[in-house]
Amino acid sequence: MYDIAIIGGGINGCCLARDAAGRGLSVLLVEMNDLSSGTSSRSTKLIHGGLRYLEHHEFSLVRKALIERETLYRIAPHIIEPLRFIFPHHKNMRPIWMMRLGLFVYDHLGGRSLLPASRRLDLRRDPAGRVLKDDFATAFEYSDCRVDDSRLVILNALDAAERGADIRPRTKLIKAVREKQHWSLTLRRMSGHELPPVQARILVNAAGPWVGEVIGRLGIKTGARVRPVKGSHIIVGKLYDHDRAYIFENPDNRIIFAIPYEKDFTLIGTTDIDITGDPATVQISPEETEYLCQAASEYFKKPVRPRDVVASYSGVRPLYGSEEIPASRLTRDSVLETDGEPGQAVLLSIFGGKITTARKLAERVLQKLETHLPAHTGNPWTATTPLPGGDFAIGSFDSLVMKLRTACPQMSAARAVRVTRAYGTRALDIFSRNGKALDPGEDFGGGLTQVEVDYLLTREWAETAEDILWRRSKLGLHLDERQVQHLETWLAEKAGVQNT
């Protein structure tokens, strides 16, 4: 009998599992695919307040997100790092004084303390202006953070598991029967193996784009309106040499970002398009690719063309709101809905939300469920407790890299930075013992070796090459087809040996 069973292994589900397990609750989390295999790994990779939401007067949402931005930076300084954004001004935009006022609000609304304030730039003198068209003379620069989104999910799941949560990826909820005071759940491994029934006092539906499908499977009626909206991104070769990002406003009043990505690339996105059908099958369309290329080319001197795209991805945001509202104007805030009469086992469904505020959302969920939880349930704790590997002071990242290179002198500087970004203080334990480097084993290319793969298989629920190359890391951008095939073959052979 679990206190809470969570359906969905994205950012909302894993943050909730972590928080609940840390309060002494027994937690089960099931995800039908890999952790973070849906929307949570297909974001714009930002921890941000949402500057454009100020224009829509969503001050409360922006304030919460800005506060969370620094909270998350403190507890995960390995996978989250500050990023400066350049916002060029042109004659058809709002007046300069209005932009300055908006950024002043953005600087102060969330009690910023770790990140530098916004400022005005002269693009004719600043290096950031060299790659932009000559039409742009003035810009504003402000702070937000970037994040490895899928690793943020994995680290929450890892911390939850280390605190006692039962994390089961590739496990699907087949049936849920509401008994008087608990749910009886039928689960099936995606390999086809049906598992023994389990019980839970509370069921939380954190299925993201599939939240409505889960409600329907349970036979529960809801008036909630879920808008599945597709957001697509393209990845092109590196467009500029500096380490700042750009935010561009388009003629349709939408904005896109151009962000330095994985050293050798630039990430451009995103779109907002309503969809129907299975969220698992979404892909970027030629029209979206053309839209993003054209929008970037309005600003960059060197045009961005569809043939420059080396990779792309699309995710579905389960936004909450009427179909009459344009997708770009729908709130990114979350809505919680409970179902259950007094004395019945409760179902709580999560609609919407964003990666920046998922930790805070978990606190809200547990507060809403307070009367259904055991009396000894603990207090909120996740705002001040580092995620795995994040137990180091902001500003000391470089010293961590040096410690790792001292223990592993054969490791290149670039690889040491990458693995320290991924694993933080735990990198030393993964790649060395007693101050000496472990045998790296098989070399799969791109700085990925067997010792790291073994860790991901045994500790982070990875099973396939896709899990390793696109969610536990982004090394899929750096390996060629032959190297990917070699990794897939090695994993299949290893799985075969283990199953004999």
Image: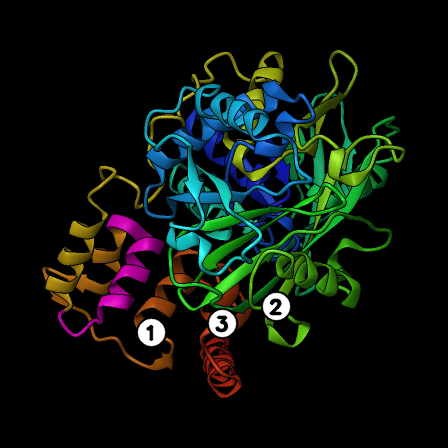
Q: Is residue 50 magenta?
A: no
Asked whether, in this view, residue 324 is left or right of residue 452, the answer is: right
**Circle 3 SS class:** helix
Instruction: Name the residue at 33% across, 42% down.
Output: 77
- Which disc number belongs to residue 447? 1
Label 1–label 3 contact, CB within 8 A: no
Q: Give 167 or 110, whichever is nearer the viewer.
A: 110
Label 1–label 2 contact, CB within 8 A: no
Q: Where does residue 385 sit, x and y in percent of width and height? A: 33, 30
Majority secondary structure in the magenta region: helix
Label 2–label 3 contact, CB within 8 A: no
Amino acid bearing label 2:
Pro
What residue is disc 2 on?
A: 303
- Which disc number belongs to residue 477? 3
Q: Earlier in the sequence, mark 1 or mark 3?
A: 1
- On screen, 428 above or below 105? below
Amino acid bearing label 3:
Leu
**Circle 1 SS class:** loop
Residue segment shown in magenta: 409-425
Categorize mark 1 by other alpha carbons within 10 Å: few (<14), some (14-19), many (20+).
some
Q: Where does residue 263 sit, x and y in percent of width and height? A: 39, 64
Instruction: Name the residue at 49% across, 65% down.
Output: 239
Residue 95 image-quadrant placement: top right
Q: CA distance from mark 1 to mark 3?
A: 12 Å
Q: Earlier in the sequence, mark 2 or mark 3?
A: 2
Q: CA distance from mark 2 to mark 3?
A: 22 Å
